[in-house]
Image: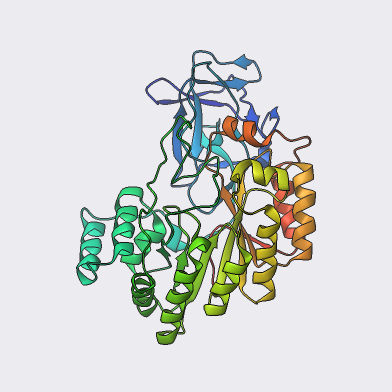
Amino acid sequence: MSAALAYCDRRGRIYFDESVAPLADGGIIREPLANELMPAPPGTMPMLLPQRRPLTRSGTQIRRHALAAALPAGYTRLLVPAYAAEPSAQPLPLFGYTFTCAVGDLLHVAAMKTDEDEVWSPRRFANGELETLVEQCAAADGENRVLRQLARCALEYGCFTAQNVFLERGEAALPVSPRCNARCVGCISELDADAGIPSPQERIAYEVSAQELARIALRHLECVPEGIVSFGQGCEGEPLLRSTTIARAIERVRVQRSNGTINMNTNGSLPRALSRCIDAGLDAVRISLNSFRHSVYAAYYRPTGYGFDDVLESVRIAVQRGLRVSLNLLTHPGVTDDEEEVAAMQAFLREVRVAMIQTRTLNIDPAWYFTAVGRPAQPLGMHAALDAIKATGARIGNFAHTH
């Protein structure tokens, strides 16, 4: 069966129109391919796109509102919605907008499953359950400012790695840095004042101590023998700016416990600072980037005091030192799968063998992102981009794994 238009009315109610063929955006406006569509998985969140009209093969649907979806964890987006924005349209909030349509009587999305881990499955809590766990943990270490931040992230922002601290499972967050050396166009904790939308999270406001970090890490690794503790979270800036504190925290942990994995999520901007953390006992690192091309990287990250070569050098150092190295690749159809991007990506991944490429949907208004980094000269399709990664021998996934 062919794809049919899925759209919203102004109240957000979803309708299907089998007489209209929708268009999608993969860097160029086109019809979706059958192998780019799948039934919307559990946990999919449909979203009305205000002041945006869906594009179809028969023209702009001026009396209908465009529909998109946010995917659950473990899926990679293949297309974004195609729409015409009204002149007064404000930027969209920072979500991962995925193309949607109807096939038969089911909502479909342009996505593919790329990982599976029950720890990251959508969670349902009984009334007050999570709050009780947070209160119990806070009572045991009431002066810990890291724990105070994690409580807010778990309850207000629904952050899984923050919740894991209280649930005693999986990968646990250790936010550490209120400062950053990049001004990412789509930063989730500190956007430019003129961005037109609020940041979805508030960044940690204080420089926590090595002792505070170590207490949380020790408790987690005691409760979760194969657990992961991770510096560098969405509610903070760049952890490498506090590498001395992180190194001291790691040393405190490793004096008492040898189990589990100590990980860092970082932009990889400061190779010497990363080496300091490795010397202290860092086991794994997840380095974020949106592109393997200097110009596209700089257009999004807008780095201060470092360059893209520093990021690549950090990847090389971590691999050479024997860490488990993942690249947190912020994917966006029409950019990740540009022919030049795929060539640059393959060249680096064949030179430097990382353990995993974690494909992460870049949460940003698609029009905003294309304005910042440009549209592709030749998009190959996200399937081709993922196949190119696999051809280098790198594993594709979405979550932190210990093996």
Residue 91 shows up from this direction? yes
Could you tell me which quadrant the N terminus lies in?
Answer: top right
* Left or right placement of residue 333 versus residue 95 in this view: right
Name the residue rendered at 22%, 67% in the picture.
142
Q: Report how many numbered discs are placed on residues in the image.
A: 0
* Left or right placement of residue 310 versus residue 173 in this view: right
Q: Position of residue 213 (x, y in %)?
A: 37, 70
Q: Position of residue 311 (x, y in %)?
A: 66, 58
Could you tell me which quadrant the C terminus lies in?
Answer: bottom right
- Return the residue nearer the eye: 2 or 134: 134
The picture quadrant where one finds residue 145 is bottom left
The picture quadrant where one finds residue 283 is bottom right
* Left or right placement of residue 152 versus residue 48 in this view: left
| Outermost residue, top side | 63
Q: Position of residue 132 (x, y in %)?
A: 20, 61
| Outermost residue, front side | 305
Name the residue rendered at 68%, 41% in the picture.
335
- Return the residue nearer the eye: 250 or 366: 250
Residue 403 shows up from this direction? no
Render colour scheme: rainbow
The correct choice, above or below, for 136 with respect to 304 in the image is below
The correct choice, above or below, for 84 with respect to 336 in the image is above
Q: Position of residue 182 (x, y in %)?
A: 55, 49
- Return the residue nearer the eye: 96 or 283: 283
The correct choice, above or below, for 311 with respect to 195 in the image is below
